[in-house]
Image: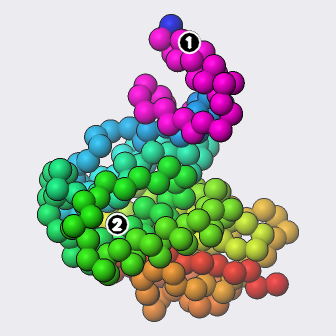
Amino acid sequence: MLPIFDASIALLHNMRSANPNLFINLTTGTDASPSWLFYADSIWRQGDDINLYGPGTPVQQWMTYRDAETWRSIVRKGPLFPLNSLMYHGIVSAENAYYGLEKVQTDGDFADQVWSYFATGTQLQELYITPSMLNKAKWDVLAEAAKWSRENAHVLVDTHWVGGDPTALEVYGWASWSKDKAILGLRNPSDKPQSYYLNLTKDFEIPQGEATRFTLTARYGSNPTVPEHYQDAVVITLQPLQTLVFEATPIK
């Protein structure tokens, strides 16, 4: 390890010793190793603050870039790194942004961005927002999703990656599980419909002996191919650039 990191770790240790309640976000020089969480509460997902990738509006392209970078730099390299301890660069709708994110977004695009962001389970929740660019509908969806995140923090702490590679425009998402409740977020980054093999035993990483049948309740978005009562693995179809968030209650 470079001497600069030895010095950084010593500094972080001294800061935490002086104030155990400090929240430390380590934003430079890290990799996808969970060992950083001995010293800090979160690390940077890597890559550019903002960039665009794939089809769709600038908002949809920004979401795909954000998640593609997370896949490339964190999930692929460190599959055991807890996604709730990542800095994703927040929700962006600001006059000082760029690549089209400095323009007023449609209510649908903004809602997709908000719900996909909170579905990541991140504990470092950032808002890069110019208030005057948000109408009542946008404020309402932001408040609803933020409160939902807080209410489900005990579940979202388990968030891990599911699905494929956003760089290849494959369906991907985030899943988290607890004995009493689970959460699944899915997104199709393609401008064409795509199927996804929904296997909740695998996606939720359910321990042996726990319930594997669920009642699925749509929290954001709707999709008739997703069964309300999940019994076994099934193929579902996501519409182009569709974002979905579901809550799963075990059937005992």
Q: What element carries label 1?
A: helix
Residue in the image at 27% along x and 64% along y: 131
The residue sitting at 56% across, 81% down in the picture is: 234
Quarter of the image where one finds residue 132: bottom left
Q: Is residue 12 visible?
A: yes
Q: Is residue 114 left or right of residue 149?
A: left
- Crowding at mark 1 (Cα within 10 Å: few <14, some 14-19, many 20+): few
Report the side of 81 relative to 166 (left or right): right
Residue 198: image location, x then y, percent: 55, 75
Q: Residue 6 carries which label?
A: 1
Q: Can residue 192 be seen in this view?
A: no
Q: Which of marks 2 and 1 is nearer the N terminus?
A: 1
What's under tag 2, amino acid-wise? Answer: Gln
- Alpha carbon distance from label 2 to label 1: 37 Å
Find residue 210 and report its horizontal and vertical position in percent.
81, 70
Residue 159: where, in percent of width, then height?
59, 58
**Few, some or many C-alpha atoms within 10 Å of disc 2 (few <14, some 14-19, many ≥20)?**
many
Which quadrant does the N terminus fall into?
Answer: top right
Task: Give the extent of the magenta segment.
Answer: 4-33
Q: Is residue 232 magenta?
A: no
According to the image, label 2 marks what residue? Answer: 113
